[in-house]
Amino acid sequence: MQIGLVMNSEWLKGTLELSRHGEIVVDNRCQTSLPGVFAAGDVTTVPFKQIIIATGDGAKAALGAFDHLIRSSVPA
């Protein structure tokens, strides 16, 4: 059963890079075109839309965000 095939990303137009299908474009660390913003799940450009893949990508996005914060933190 599928909930829907239309991406709920209309509100991001002009903020992040979206594919022609309305998916949020992410790199291999789940980072979007806006530095410091990460995305995961079926609304991204992952090739397969499955809950287990979205869950794994959520973990990747969290690790990517953590790495970004560590590398961009300002020394005290």
Image (cartoon, grey):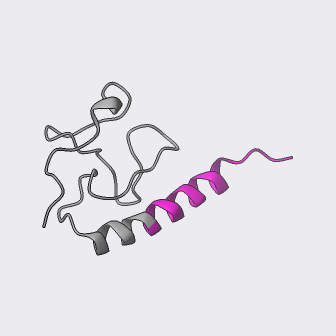
Residue 19 position in % (x across, y down): 19, 40
Question: Which portion, as a residue range, is magenta?
Answer: 59-76
State the residue in front, 2 or 30: 2
Residue 22: quarter of image: top left
9 lies above or below 27: above
Q: Residue at x 23, y 69 (%)?
A: 50
Give me the residue at 13% from left, 67% from top: 1
- Please identify the quarter of the rendering in which residue 65 is found: bottom right
Q: Which percent across, then down, holds residue 70?
A: 66, 56
Relative vertical location of residue 67 with respect to residue 9 in this rendering, above or below: below
The percent position of residue 35, horizontal first and vertical second, equals 49, 40
- In the rendered view, does 71 fall on the left or right side of 9? right
Q: Residue at x 45, y 60 (%)?
A: 61
Say how many tags the image has: 0
In this rendering, would 6 be left or right of 54? left
Q: Dominant secondary structure of the magenta stretch?
A: helix
For image coordinates 48% across by 44% down, the residue present is 37
Spot the residue most to the bottom. 52
Image-based side of 39 in relation to 68, left or right: left
Residue found at the very far right of the displayed protein: 76
Residue 62 falls left or right of residue 69: left
Residue closest to the far top? 14
